[in-house]
Image (tube, rainbow, N blue to C red):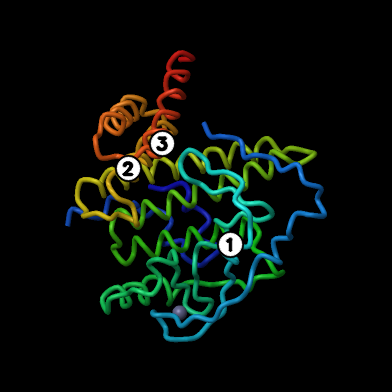
Amino acid sequence: MAAFLTGLKDLGLECLENTDIFGEKKQEVKQSEKTEKPVADIPKEEDLLYEKTLECPCCGKRFRTKVYKTGKAKLLSTDMDLRPVYEGIDVTKYDVIQCEYCGYAALPKYFPYLTQAQRKLIQENICQKVQLKPYEGGVYSYDEALQRYKLSLVNAVVKHAKNSEKAFVCLKTAWLVRGYRLEQEGMEKVDAAKVEELQSMENENLQNAYQGFVEARKTETFPICGMDVYSLDYLLAALAYEVKAYDDAARLVSGLLTSTSANRRIKDKALMIKEQLQAARKAE
Ligand SMILES: [Zn+2]
C-alpha cells in the first residue's frame, strides 16, 4: 500500500488509493546550489515554458500541455540521484503529460505508446471515474504537479507497465517532492510539519524507485529507461545510499569501480558515493 497515493479522492479515484505499486505482477540529499545572481537576472518560470498541442492516444482528443524550453534554462547542478537543478525553474514539474479530457497521464517517453488492451484498462479504471480540475495561472504549483505524478503512477499500474516505467515515475516524484521541500525550507516562515510530510513522501518514493529498478535490473533488457547497465548501477547505488541500504550501495559502487568497461565519468561519480558512504557509516 502506498501512502503517497492517498489524496487520489480529489481526482475521483479513491478506489485506487490502496494500489500496490509493484505487487501486481507474478503474473541525504545534497542541498541545491543557490544562485548568486541578482533576482532580476533570473529568468521567470513562465518565460521558460510554452504550450504544445498533442493528440491523446487514449481518447483521441487534441489537448494543450505546458513544456519547458530545453536549452533555455541553465543547469546549475545535478543531485547524486541525477535530479537536475535548473535556474529559475524546477523542470521536473513539467515532466508528466496528462490529457485534460480523459486523465490518461504518463512520462513523455511513454505517453504516445498504448496497446489496445492498455487503452481499455485505462478507459475503464481511470477515464470513467477521474474528475480533473482546470489549472489556474501560467505555471504549475507543486501541488498541481504532484497530482499529475500521482495520476501518472496509477495509470502505469492500471496499464501493467514494466517495473522500470513505474520506478521512473517514483524517482521523478521523489525529485519533485525534494524541490517542493527545498522551496518550503527556503521560506521565511518554515512550516516544520509540511517539511516533515514532504521528507517522508520523498523517502517513500525513493524506496519505491529503488525496489522497482532492482526488479527491472533482474528482469528487463537494456537499455532500461534509456540507461545502460553502468548508468543504472550508478543510479541504484545512489538510491541504495539514499534509502540507507548501505551494504547494497557498497556492493554496487565496488562493482562500478572495478569494472573494466565503466567509463571514467561514472567511476568518478561512484567514488563520490563511496566517500559519502564511509562518512555515513562512521556517523552511525
Ligand atoms: Zn485523453
* Classed neighbour count for the residue bearing mark 2: other residues with Cα under 10 Å, few (<14), some (14–19), many (≥20): some
Q: Secondary structure at mark 1?
A: loop
Residue drawn 64% across the image and 68% down it: 49
Quadrant of the snapshot with the C terminus: top left
- In whole angstroms, how far apart are the C-alphas of marks 2 and 1? 32 Å
* Classed neighbour count for the residue bearing mark 3: other residues with Cα under 10 Å, few (<14), some (14–19), many (≥20): many
Of 156 and 42, the residue lying toward us? 42
Amino acid found under the numbered disc labelled 2? Gln
Of 215 and 196, the residue lying toward us? 215
Q: Position of residue 133 (x, y in %)?
A: 60, 71
From the viewer's perspective, is 164 left or right of 86?
left
The residue at which mark 2 appears reads as: 211
Label 1 near label 2: C-beta < 8 Å? no
The residue at which mark 1 appears reads as: 71
Q: Quadrant of residue 163?
A: bottom left
Q: Position of residue 202 (x, y in %)?
A: 51, 42
Q: Secondary structure at mark 2?
A: helix
The earlier-in-sequence mark between 2 and 1 is: 1
Of 63 and 50, the residue lying toward us? 50
Amino acid found under the numbered disc labelled 1? Gly
